[in-house]
Amino acid sequence: MTFSNSAKLNKLLAAQQHGFSLAQDFYKDIDVYHTEINQIFLKHWLYAGHVSQIPNTGDYITFEFDTESVIIVRTAQGEVKAHMNVCRHRGSRICLEKSGSQKALTCPYHAWSYDLDGELISARNMPDDFVPSDNGLHKVNITLIGGLVFVCLSKDPPSIDSLQKELEQIVDIFGINSMKLAEQKSYRIPANWKLAVENYQECYHCANSHQEFAKIHAMAKPPKLFQKAKTDYCEANQNDPKFAELNHYFDLAEQGQEGFQYDRNPLIRGAQSGSLSGKPVAPLLGSLQNYDGGASELMVGPLSYFLIYDDHMIGYRFLPISVDECICVVSWFVNGSAVQGEDYQLDELTWLWNVTTLADKKIIMNNQKGVNSRFYQPGRLSEMETFQQSFLDWYLKALVK
Amino acid sequence: MTFSNSAKLNKLLAAQQHGFSLAQDFYKDIDVYHTEINQIFLKHWLYAGHVSQIPNTGDYITFEFDTESVIIVRTAQGEVKAHMNVCRHRGSRICLEKSGSQKALTCPYHAWSYDLDGELISARNMPDDFVPSDNGLHKVNITLIGGLVFVCLSKDPPSIDSLQKELEQIVDIFGINSMKLAEQKSYRIPANWKLAVENYQECYHCANSHQEFAKIHAMAKPPKLFQKAKTDYCEANQNDPKFAELNHYFDLAEQGQEGFQYDRNPLIRGAQSGSLSGKPVAPLLGSLQNYDGGASELMVGPLSYFLIYDDHMIGYRFLPISVDECICVVSWFVNGSAVQGEDYQLDELTWLWNVTTLADKKIIMNNQKGVNSRFYQPGRLSEMETFQQSFLDWYLKALVK
Amino acid sequence: MTFSNSAKLNKLLAAQQHGFSLAQDFYKDIDVYHTEINQIFLKHWLYAGHVSQIPNTGDYITFEFDTESVIIVRTAQGEVKAHMNVCRHRGSRICLEKSGSQKALTCPYHAWSYDLDGELISARNMPDDFVPSDNGLHKVNITLIGGLVFVCLSKDPPSIDSLQKELEQIVDIFGINSMKLAEQKSYRIPANWKLAVENYQECYHCANSHQEFAKIHAMAKPPKLFQKAKTDYCEANQNDPKFAELNHYFDLAEQGQEGFQYDRNPLIRGAQSGSLSGKPVAPLLGSLQNYDGGASELMVGPLSYFLIYDDHMIGYRFLPISVDECICVVSWFVNGSAVQGEDYQLDELTWLWNVTTLADKKIIMNNQKGVNSRFYQPGRLSEMETFQQSFLDWYLKALVK
């Protein structure tokens, strides 16, 4: 019996009311946490990077959460592959840096060497009956969605077929395939990962906590005002594929398919991008010809989010380190032909979401502190927390699926 | 079944011999710790501050232990109230600082706002059937004893009626109501909270470890010498109410009443106050007219201690952070009309108990290290550890009461 | 029932295959860890220091692992004795430093005082029926092997009779009795202790990870080349007692006797000592008359290792701090008459094994990280890991013995 069908979990689930925040144990219990790793993080597609980070044969990046580390590497055939970063000899990590370039994946301990496809090509002094071909690196499922690298540690990952197909045009419009990563920052947050995800999923807190964001995004307004702005904005652009609404997210995902969502929202009138001034901070993306005062949101799988301004894209991922600590990795992408220092300045590009993420980190820490109290009890969600509610509905089912 | 009636605890209790220090598990076992929180820290009155810290409407201080945080605030009606520092929406801490001043208690996350009485007065975009009046902050019992603020997180706190009444005169003599907090320091100690409390409760270690203290306090002398000094001192002052002996502490507390104790002890001949030189370091307290070479000890509830010299009062509280870490908060009070820099100097005022507490911190850490050994076994207590013994007797019963 | 005969451990042991690294639980499970402490660290002789560190009456050193601390002290009779560093009163550590000198072992808390033999000689204000002679410090078994101090915390330690006898000549040759400790460094490693021990036990990683070592030691070569070098070297010296091969290690230890091993290996041609240049860094040891291009290895008990160059000896011990942290203490010994600054320079003496241990620390950390992965599985050992395999065979039996 695993915890995912235990009496303790069933009791927790039975007590959880729709429309309320989660009970304390969901944020603190170590068995719940391990169930989440098994049922969510090991079963779904997770955003791990972008092809522009590993242009040449042997280039690699590592992707880590909880106790796991994955190597994503460009092979000799130019493919992108993923392997567990665990030597088959005595288990050492093989790639020790966040990124690098190697001719072969050679373990720093005893020099067992794997080719870029993960096959064991060298292991000195092994017994005669040792079979190198049985000792390749554990393979990890990998897929590219518009140049974005996703991995799934399950042997039986959800399908991304419909997702791939439906997003094709969006990928083209913004030139996601040919973007380049301009900057990436990691924010360690001493809180359960769900408090970070929930924080990202609602803008009920934006007006209060994110003045910088609220100056740019109409979404920080009260629901009626925002809805009005969105309706006006989208109606004027009904036939533009950039304004597609694709919603197969959470419980709306088709059976066996990874969930996703695409949507476009208006900025505050006059704003063109997510920057201090609202002015562009990089050249237009993809095939865009002008700024139309909006930004797109793309969600792929339950834990990876992209916000696409007309001149840059930001990726967010939220990953657990342990039951009470998580890491938020924020990535800034620009047009692949843009030149740093000429076409964009890093500090200008990253300003808005750096200040916003730092503010959120503080908020999330204080949320965890309060949730830890014996006096915390699940509270009623507002009408501006419906997306978070969708996540919670999905999450509670995912624990026992 | 809770741990407080478990076989494990019963076994521990049955093995514990009177006259000996506690068995290792009492200092290390996480179930014992949680029982202590429930049976002791959540059931008794705890010293949280002084009215002088929150003179004006909206002034607040926070009081914290284990996973809990309490807001103590001056209301619009001039009352002092206490609320759990946990937002009823999604649980965030509301007041983030140790002290401050706010017109309303507004959560930094989604701006739910509570008035100073804890009632929810603003929550945007909530569903129609949401009832604000059901969503006030959890109230915490609070009482003032001579201006000293005590809180009790239980719904059914022990009575403080007899305590209030019996201490009335003492409060008047020293002017506790009108004192002001001059300084407060926190000492984090990587040890179980009981090792810190036990350390405070006995002066068997004073002669050896606290030369500074031993130069001022007769209590550091061997029992017979101290008893002689005390008898002489008190007999000369029999009818002075300052020399009252009120002992309703630990097992002597009346049924349903919070325990307390008041007592007066002689200093070393020539000393007038607890300072480097033994000379006064602040103006006389309350209605006192002269220095009489003694100091009073006041204990209110099981975990709050006050030492009253004729010119200043020191408060001590010992609170757990976790099973193996605690915090000792030391507060220095002076006559409310004294002016810092003119009537007293902070470094002179705080010198003795800062050096003494720092020395104790080191002692307590090394005590915990030894207690952690498999070779530790409860040791025989001396005749100078009878007050600590009273605490242990009370503590062992409190775990299962 | 203890864990050492539990179903969980039996299952782990049954699943463990000879010729493979250990399963993950052996490196992470807290019950396995506690079993190791009981079955291995509390039952065997552990290297704690050298007589040269405590030449005079009252000189002491402390020896620590897990939650335990032992005082090793020179008594008034000139003997070396060991006591648990736990006061019999309320458990405080008594000696707080790594080394020092005291007339008596006086507890810093309440001044209970023990003579250097551990007998309680002073405890103030104790009840009349208190028996000081029942309250001496817990005695720890101690033995000297060529001036090297070993302690065993069990009441029934394995015999060291044959070990003492068989090593007598070796001790003489290198003058171990009269060596002096020149330097000692501690390396804290955030990994399970076995990963550190296994790392020390095999030279499969030397060629790859330790260029500095590989320039000096023939052992870093492939097995056949090394074996040839060793055969040539030893055959030429068959009757020299320095070239004895004593192997009573791990499963070869006689029933009831502590295991040990002595062996001599060639250095790289031209090298005389373990130094940057291969040249000597200190005067010849003991009765040696010349450098013969080799180094001896001595292992005493399962966790203490000595590497004896002709001009200096290095001691290594690996001790757990917790399940996921250990400490490696490296000691450098020279001829007792050598004078620092004249006959040897500390930086030259310690260079090789400081760089090597720092490199190993990094290796071991990365090994632990990989072992923590769900995808780690025990891997096949090479033909250069046979000594490590002997340790694993012994270790698995020791857990349940």
Image (cartoon, coloured by chain):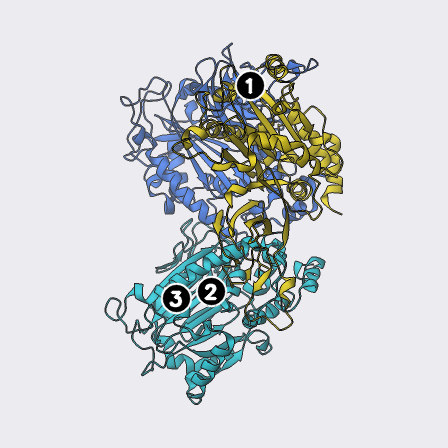
Chain colours: A yellow, B blue, C cyan
Mark 1 nearby-residue class (10 Å; few <14, some 14–19, many ≥20):
many
Image quadrant containing the C terminus of chain A = top right
Q: Is residue A153 left or right of residue A5?
A: left
Q: Is residue C44 left or right of residue A247?
A: left
Q: CB of mark 2 within 8 Å of CB of mark 1? A: no
Separation of marks 2 and 3 at Cα, in angstroms: 10 Å
Asked if residue A362 shows in the view, the reply is: yes
Where in the figure is residue B209, as x and y percent of width and height? 38, 46
- Determine the secondary structure under disc 3: helix
Q: Are marks 2 and 3 on the same chain?
A: yes
Separation of marks 3 and 1 at Cα, in angstroms: 61 Å
Q: Indicate the amino acid at tag 2.
A: Asn
Q: Nearer the viewer, residue C274 or C103?
A: C274
Where in the figure is residue B19, as x and y percent of width and height? 55, 47
Name the residue located 46 percent from the left edge and 73 percent from the top edge: C221
- Determine the secondary structure under disc 2: helix
For label 1, the residue is A220
The dot on residue C212 is 3
Q: Residue furthest top?
A: B77
When asked about the image quadrant of residue B87, the answer is: top right
Q: Is residue C188 above or below residue A64?
A: below
For label 2, the residue is C208
Q: Indicate the amino acid at tag 1.
A: Ala
Q: Indicate the amino acid at tag 3.
A: Glu
Q: Are marks 3 and 1 on the same chain?
A: no
Q: Is residue C259 above or below residue B272?
A: below
Mark 3 nearby-residue class (10 Å; few <14, some 14–19, many ≥20):
some
Separation of marks 2 and 1 at Cα, in angstroms: 57 Å
